[in-house]
Image: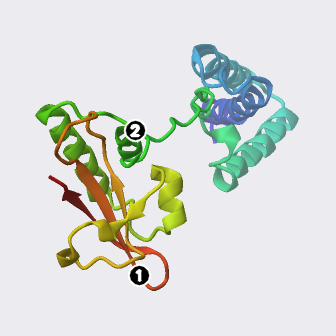
Amino acid sequence: MTRTLLSLLTGLLAMFALGTAAWIACAILLTGGDFMNFRAGFLVVPAIALAAGFLGARTRHAAWRGVIGVASVGAAAFWIFMPDGWWASPPPPPSIPVPAAVAPVAPAPPACDAVKAWRSRVIQGNADDAEAVQVLARCLASGELVGRTREDLEAALGPSGPATVFSSSFGYTAQDRTWPVGTLPEGWVGGVPNLVVTFGSDGRSERAGMVHTQ
C-alpha cells in the first residue's frame, strides 16, 4: 500500500471515528431543544471530523494509526448495533403546554322543567294556550316521564290529581294521575292542557299523554 493511499485511508477512518464521537458528545451535553440545531448539526460535528481527518492523514506513527483503527471499529459498532437510540436521532418536537381543563358546562335543564314553571302561569288567551301545549308536547317527546314513580313525578312537577276526573271513556284508573299545565283567570270558562300519566302494576309510569279540557 502506497504512503499516499495509507494516509488517505487513515484520514477517512479518523474522520469517521472522531465524527461519531462528536455526535455522541453533542447528544449527551446539549439539551434536546439544542441538539441537531445549526451549530451542533452543521458546524461542530463536521468541524471536528474534518480536523480529525486532516490530522489523521498527516500522522506517520504506526501506534496512532492503530488507535485510529480501533476507534473506527468502535464507531462502526455503534452505528451497527445502536443506530436508533436517542443519541442517533433528532430530539422529539417540543411539548406543547396543555391548557388547564375547562370545567364541564352544566347540562341544559330537562325538557319537563318548563312544565313545572307553566303550571302556575295564568293563560290569558290563545297564544298562551298554544305555548303551554308546545311546552307539554316537548316534555312528552323527551321520554322523561316514562319509568318514573308517582313520587318522582310529583317531586319534579308538583302535586297531581286523579285522572278519573276526565270522562270514563279514557279508561283511566284510580292510580293514574294528572297535572294541569297553566290556570285560567278567575271567572273564565274553558280548559287548559293536562299531563296525564298511566301507571303500571309496579308503580312506575307506563304511558304519558295530553288531554285538553274545554
Q: Which residue is situated farthest in the bottom direction here?
A: 201
Give the quarter of the image for residue 17.
top right
Q: Residues within 10 Å of mark 2 (few under 14, many from 20)?
A: few
Amino acid beneath label 1? Gly
Q: Secondary structure at mark 2?
A: helix
Give the residue at x 15% y 40%: 130
Mark seen at residue 117: 2
Quick check: 159 above or below 47? below
* CA distance for labels 2 and 1: 27 Å
Residue at the disc numbered 1: 200
Give the quarter of the image for residue 26.
top right
Q: Which residue is situated farthest in the front direction here?
A: 187
In the rendered structure, which disc, 2 or 1, sits on the residue that comes first in sequence? Answer: 2
What is the quadrant of the N terminus in the image?
top right
Residue 197, position as x, y percentages in the image: 35, 67
Q: Which residue is situated farthest in the left direction here?
A: 126
Would residue 113 appear left or right of 128 to someone viewing this image? right
Amino acid beneath label 2? Ala
In this view of the protein, which residue sits in the foreground, 92 or 117? 117
